[in-house]
Amino acid sequence: MDSYQIVLDDDLLLDYYQFKSGNMLNANRTTRLLNFYKPHLTNVSQLIRINKGDNALKQQLAQAGYTTQSVQDLANLTKLKLILSSTNNLYPYVNVMGNDDLDINFTGTFKNTPRQKAMDHIKSLCAHANSIFIYDKYLGNKTPQLLNNLFGLFPTKKYSLLYQRDQLSQVTISAWKSINPNVTIKEDTRGSYRDFHDRYLVIDNKIEIILSSGFDNLLSGTNDFTYVLRVLS
């Protein structure tokens, strides 16, 4: 169990073996599988069902007790307790073909350590943006110094900065425009993030950055901070 993280449904396990042999019959599905892949657990019954695995592997699995369990029971023996599937969205399955609440994203976690890599990454993602949406329902309570440091992550070129109603004061807007006269700062009226707990940056409606503990902890070296990147389109 220590080294096994997930289980593959039968069709994806077959794709995995075909990929290893250089014979991808379903290239799109195999590519999606590889995006999600972690070390997997299988058993003798599953290998027999898909007609894969040599006798040595089957003997090794049998000696370890992995013989006739269902894929659901196998999943309970793994670290993540998940089954990758190409069709099923219900727990413990994760549909690698999309339309699932569980997805694979890049994340960075910092615990009482400098966040320079995170800041450099976010600054690079924003560098060529035409539009940046910022959301933090407590943004209006931040100090001017923190707000100016936050604005320093954004481009110095012409772009639109969008915010939710009441989250930026006119004083902050004026201060930011004095730093970059080319920026257009305006209220976003869609309200799609209103009253959310987490903090967000959305870049050109293509990339969403979720900040677990806010911009304060992004710009600080204390406490814990995690950011998650999601490709929207």
Image (cartoon, rainbow, N blue to C red):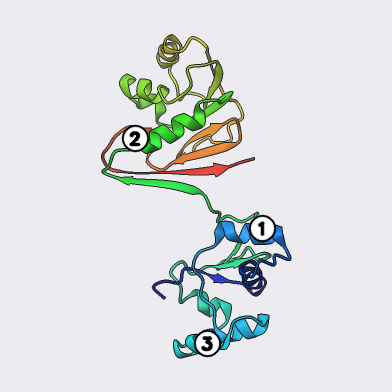
Of 223 and 63, nearer the camera is 63
Q: Residue at x 54, y 36 (%)?
A: 193
The answer, for residue 75, to whether it is visible in the render is yes
| 45 sits to left or right of 223 | right
Q: Position of residue 228 (x, y in %)?
A: 47, 44
Of 179 and 118, nearer the camera is 118
| 149 sits to left or right of 186 | left
- Residue named by callout 1: 97
Of 51 and 49, nearer the camera is 51
Sequence-wise, which precedes: disc 2 or disc 1? 1
Give amino acid for label 2.
Gln
Distance CA(mark 3)–CA(mark 2)? 49 Å
- Residue named by callout 2: 116
Of 19 and 47, nearer the camera is 19
Quadrant holding the N terminus: bottom left
Give amino acid for label 3.
Ala
Q: Position of residue 68 (x, y in %)?
A: 56, 88
Q: Secondary structure at mark 3?
A: helix
Q: Callout 1 environment at 10 Å: few (<14), some (14 to 19), or many (20+)? A: some
